């Protein structure tokens, strides 16, 4: 498996059209997420045993252990746990054993405060669960439940939601390391992986809502806030083989929340919370766990740098109302998730010409 784990007045109508024209996420993919005609994999077999959870292997350090707490405190004191806060605010458990990639993406989308432009429940535009992605996705839900998603599919789904993604893979051997110099291959060494982790945990991306609130509260901080909103920060997601970490299961996705320099270890917020709670793992062990081939792609797994959309919603506007900061809209202008309704005038064209639409 790729990644598996055990309402109208004319004024209101005009406002609706304006909101949908300016806020719909666009999809920019070079190839389909699933090749046309690809059959569904066989259903997963029924389990032979039931578990309350899994014992954490001794090569990993539990986040809530004495050592785990000490590492977190030191990481916090060294400004190497800044990503923990936006990620932990959105941390959730995957709702299906094969949803690790989808759940991780939902977590990142909420941490980046991406607007789904549909209502999850009531009047709230928020990625409330994995269904928010799967019901709008070009990959069948049943396919994801049977085999998860690959690194490339994860990138495609993220870009469909407006996230800027940079994909990297580990070097598979020293020969590749010699050949990769000056080439365009996406293989990178452990030193780059470690640096990417450090940068991610030290300076996570600032959401547009956070920037807008700072500008509204402190007008003199406008320039500084805009600069930090474009600070190049990102969240880091890893895709690794569990067996390489002495865990049960196959491929898995989860984000990195902190880095502890003395032990050269990073904090994995494992989204399979029913199985393994967050833990510390050395950078070398995690890097090595990304090297084995994913049978679904014939390539190594890897890590992803998840950046927010580059275009600011309000540009250089200094004075913002509370309604603008909160993204207030008439509820009738925002369809409910799963309703199959879209108020975007060009929705059909976007779907018909999307590069991941196998029926176009």
Image: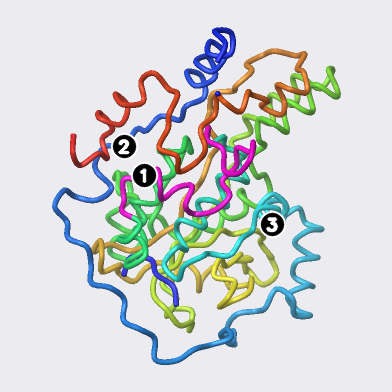
Q: Give the range drawn in magenta.
A: 117-140
- Number of other residues with Cα within 10 Å of mark 1, as a class: few under 14, some 14 to 19, many 20 or more: many
Query: Is the magenta region chiefly helix, strand or loop?
Result: loop
Q: Which residue is drawn at 64% across and 36% down?
A: 123
Disc marking residue 156: 1
Query: In this view of the protein, which residue sits in the foreground, 244 or 170?
Result: 244
Disc marking residue 94: none
Residue linked to disc 2: 29
Q: Residue at x 64, y 58 (%)?
A: 91
Q: Is mark 1 on a helix, strand or loop?
A: helix
Which circle's residue, 2 or 3, is located before the other in the chain?
Answer: 2
Q: Which residue is drawn at 60% across and 44% down?
A: 121
In which quadrant is the C terminus drawn? Answer: top left
Q: What element carries label 2?
A: loop
Residue linked to disc 3: 88
Task: Residue 357: name its quadrant.
Answer: top left
In which quadrant is the N terminus drawn? Answer: bottom left
Query: In this view of the protein, which residue sits in the foreground, 334 or 233?
Result: 334
Compared with residue 138, is residue 303 higher up or lower down, i.e. above or below? below
What percent of the width, then of the height, locates residue 31? 24, 41
What percent of the width, then of the height, locates residue 136? 40, 43
Which circle's residue, 1 or 2, is located before the other in the chain?
Answer: 2
Say if mark 1 contacts mark 2, CB within 8 Å.
Answer: yes
Spatial distance from mark 1 to mark 3, Cα to Cα?
A: 24 Å
């Amino acid at each position: 498996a790729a990644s598996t784990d055990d309402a109208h007045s004319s004024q209101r109508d005009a406002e609706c059209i304006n909101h949908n024209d300016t806020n719909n996420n666009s999809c920019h993919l070079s190839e389909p997420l699933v090749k046309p005609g690809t059959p569904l994999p066989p259903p997963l077999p029924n389990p032979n045993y039931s578990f309350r959870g899994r014992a954490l292997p001794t090569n990993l350090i539990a986040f809530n252990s004495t050592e785990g707490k000490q590492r977190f405190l030191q990481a916090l004191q060294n400004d190497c746990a800044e990503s923990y806060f936006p990620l932990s605010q959105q941390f959730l458990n995957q709702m299906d054993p094969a949803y690790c990639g989808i759940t991780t993406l939902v977590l990142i989308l909420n941490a980046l405060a991406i607007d789904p432009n549909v209502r999850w429940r009531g009047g709230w535009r928020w990625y409330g669960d994995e269904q928010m992605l799967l019901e709008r996705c070009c990959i069948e839900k049943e396919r994801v439940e049977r085999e998860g998603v690959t690194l490339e599919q994860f990138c495609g789904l993220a870009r469909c939601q407006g996230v800027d993604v940079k994909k990297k893979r580990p070097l598979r051997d020293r020969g590749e390391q010699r050949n990769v110099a000056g080439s365009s291959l996406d293989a990178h060494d452990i030193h780059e992986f470690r640096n990417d982790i450090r940068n991610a945990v030290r300076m996570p991306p600032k959401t547009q809502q956070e920037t807008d609130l700072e500008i509204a509260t402190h007008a003199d901080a406008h320039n500084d806030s805009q600069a930090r909103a474009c600070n190049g920060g990102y969240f880091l997601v890893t895709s690794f083989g569990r067996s390489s970490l002495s865990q049960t299961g196959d491929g898995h996705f989860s984000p990195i929340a902190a880095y502890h320099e003395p032990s050269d270890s990073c904090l994995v917020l494992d989204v399979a919370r029913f199985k393994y709670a967050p833990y510390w793992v050395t950078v070398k062990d995690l890097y090595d766990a990304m090297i084995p081939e994913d049978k679904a792609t014939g390539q190594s797994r890897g890590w992803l740098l998840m950046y927010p959309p580059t275009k600011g919603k309000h540009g250089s506007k200094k004075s913002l109302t509370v309604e603008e900061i909160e993204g207030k809209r008439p509820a009738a202008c925002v369809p409910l998730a799963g309703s199959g309704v879209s108020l975007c005038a060009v929705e059909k064209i976007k779907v018909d010409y999307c590069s991941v639409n196998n029926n176009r």
